[in-house]
Amino acid sequence: MAQPSNEILLQVQGLKVAYGGIEAVKGVDLEVRAGELVTLIGSNGAGKTTTMKAVTGTLPFDGEIRYLGESIRGKGAWDLVHKGLVMVPEGRGVFARMTIVENLQMGAYTRKDKAGIKADIERMFGIFPRLRERKDQLAGTMSGGEQQMLAMARALMSQPKLLLLDEPSMGLSPIMVDKIFEVVRDVYALGVTILLVEQNASRALALADRGYVMDSGLITMSGPGQELLNDARVRAAYLGQ
Ligand SMILES: Nc1ncnc2c1ncn2[C@@H]1O[C@H](COP(=O)(O)OP(=O)(O)OP(=O)(O)O)[C@@H](O)[C@H]1O
C-alpha cells in the first residue's frame, strides 16, 4: 500500500461557498497529503460536491485553497487538470457517443507521449478487464457501473497527482458497489492520492486513511478512517446503527 508522505497536496482553509444568498459551505478546513486516501462523508445536501467544485476551480469561493503549495484562486479548471488535479464527477460524464478506447484517449489529451498513452490504455485494461472486453462499444450503451469504471480509467489516463472521486458508488447495484470500492482500493494501492466523496460512509471509512464528516456546510468530525467508523456518533448518524 502507498505510504502517506508529509507533502501536502491539497490544503483547504476557511472555505465558504454560496449560491446566491444561500451558504452551502460555511467554513471548511481539510487537507490531503501525498499517498493518502482521504474521504469526505455526509448526508444529502451537506455541501460535499460544492466543496469539490470549489477545489477544482469551477466555483467562486471565499477562504483559501492551495494545491501543490499554490493558491488556486484565479486558476482555471483546465489549468488545474494540467497540474494533475482531476475529478471524476457525480454522474460520471463519459462521452456517450465515443467508444471506450476513444474515451481513454480523450483522458490523455494533456499528454504528448503516444507510446506511453498506448501502454497506459493497456494498463487500464489490466485494472479494468471489463473495459477490455468492451473496448469498441459506445460508452453510452454501457451499464452504470461500467461507465463509472470508464470514468475512473479515463481520469487515470491523465496521470493525476490527486484524484477526486465524487460519489462513485451512487446509483449502482450492491455487486457493482463492491466492485467500485475494490477498484478504488486498487487505484490507491498503485500510489494514486485520492479524495473520495461518499454517502456510503461505512465503505468509504473502511478504506480511508483519514476521513472528514460534513454536515450543513461544516466539518463536524475528522480522524483516522477506522476511528470514525467505530465512533458512536458516526454510527448513529451515518451508519444507521
Ligand atoms: N447550483 C446550485 N444552486 C443553488 N443551490 C445549490 C446549487 N448546487 C447545490 N446547491 C445547494 O447547496 C447545498 C449543498 O449541495 P451539495 O451538492 O454540495 O451537497 P452534497 O453534500 O454533495 O449532497 P449530495 O450527497 O446529495 O450530492 C444543497 O442545499 C444544495 O441544494
Image (spheres, rainbow, N blue to C red):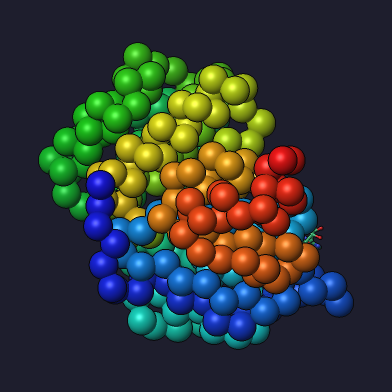
Residue 65 seen by the camera:
yes
Q: Position of residue 70 (x, y in %)?
A: 39, 83
Residue at (33%, 37%) from the top-left corner?
A: 186
Q: Position of residue 91 (x, y in %)?
A: 62, 40
Q: Is residue 153 above or below residue 228?
A: above
Q: Is residue 109 left or right of residue 89?
A: left
Quadrant of image for the C terminus: top right
Q: Position of residue 149 (x, y in %)?
A: 45, 32
Q: Is residue 146 left or right of residue 6?
A: right
Residue sitting at the far right? 21
Q: Position of residue 29 (x, y in %)?
A: 57, 76
Q: Is residue 108 left or right of residue 76?
A: left
- Ligand 1 location (quadrant): bottom right
Residue at (32%, 21%) from the top-left corner?
A: 129
Residue 168 seen by the camera:
no
Number of disc labels: 0
Residue at (41%, 32%) from the top-left corner?
A: 182
Q: Is residue 6 left or right of residue 56?
A: left
Residue at (16%, 49%) from the top-left corner?
A: 113
Residue sitting at the far left? 115
- Report the front residue among 83 and 4: 4
Image-quadrant location for residue 51: bottom right
- Report the front residue among 22 and 111: 22
